[in-house]
Image: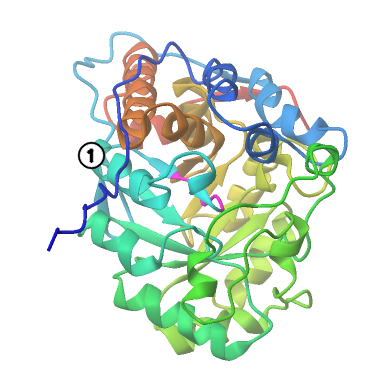
Amino acid sequence: MIDAVKTDPFGKVNAIDVLDLASLEGRAEKVLGRGEFGYISEGSDDGYTMRRNTTAFQDVEMLPRVLQGVEKPDQSTTFMGAKVASPLLTAPIAGNTLAHSSGELGLAKGAKEAGIMMSQSTFASKPIAETAAVSDGAPYMFQLYMPKDWSYCEYLLDEAKNAGALAIILTADSTLGGYRKKDVMNHYHLKGRLANLEGYNSGQTGVGAGGLFKESMQKLDLALIDKLASYSGLPIIIKGIQHPDDAVAAINAGAAGIYVSNHGGRQLDGAPGAIEQLPAIAATVDHRVPIIFDGGVQRGTHVLKALALGADLVGVGRPFSYGLALGGWQGVKAVADHLKMEINIAMQLTGCQTIEDVKRMKIKTRFA
């Protein structure tokens, strides 16, 4: 009897050189399928908000200090009691096997090796338990698209809690999918598993991007925060906050964290760049709960600007998908390591020894 061949769960991996995060997109396009690349890279409608997410950083200026006695800056930090080597988060992205066969397993291993926080989407291509096993004690969060079926929600929350998730990230800005032209032009349908749906015996394959939201609840309200927290016993972070009033309302309803994001410009086109909204939201939150930020981050200086404007953790999405496509988990780690290198340089040149110093840095903005 011949033993079955064991498949490496991390697939083909290789070290990659990273010149900068922006250049990864063109390289990844060459190795990804047309539909897959279109799905990952695209913003909604005309792509204004997606582009503004990055260009808005040009309207934020850091005021460097000198003679501050800085040597070998320390970018480690703590988020909700978890120690990480850098204030970076792999922002939750659906179906990572679109980029690489290892999917979320490669993302989790790359994040663990780089010492950064990992988050996993409800619409992941690998089960929660398998991904958490790769994280193996490294800090990990689970992102929830609120299902219409409460029993399915209980299943997801149970899986996340059993996997040791630090918190639940409830996405509130995606009650339906934004209009994305490339998916229409490519007649693109997602391939592979939606593992967390399969685990509940309600999975489907070959669904369109908009079809992912078919079973998600459209009528979200503040009462969900307490309901999710009471059932899971985990902190609930609200993702998709773009207005200060929503941040205040979420905190008053029991949210343990605020996630400032416009979904990478993939939902409402015509919204401001995410960094433009961060200062006002941070002012209203006033350190009552931690803040996560994502949106267009491509430089270490972008990370510093977000931290100085009120963020505690900074998410990066597409560049990690591109790193995964180019090198598997080693590609993810290479992207994180490059960003950490840029953060280190920026800290040294702004006179910041620690992340707390970065948060106290003086900033000038040119937007209202």
Quadrant that contains the N terminus = bottom left
Asked where in the image residue 34 lies, by quadrant, the reply is top right
The magenta segment is: 90-94
The amino acid sitting under disc 1 is: Glu
Tell me what residue is drawn at x 39 percent, y 67 percent: 128
Residue 50 in which image quadrant: top right
Q: Position of residue 171 (x, y in %)?
A: 62, 63
**Furthest residue toward front:** 1
**Would you identify the image quadrant in which residue 45 lies?**
top right
Residue 178 lies within the magenta run: no
User: What's the residue at 84%, 42% (across, down)?
Assistant: 269
Q: Residues within 10 Å of mark 1 (few under 14, many from 20)?
A: some
Residue hosting label 1:
113
**Mark 1 falls on what kind of element?**
helix
Q: Nearer the viewer, residue 249 or 8?
A: 8
222 relative position to 27: left or right: right
Image quarter of the C terminus:
top right
The answer to whether 156 is drawn above or below residue 273 in the figure is below
Residue at 84% x, 43% y: name it.
184
Residue 160 image position (x, y, % from top left): 39, 73
How was this image coloured? rainbow
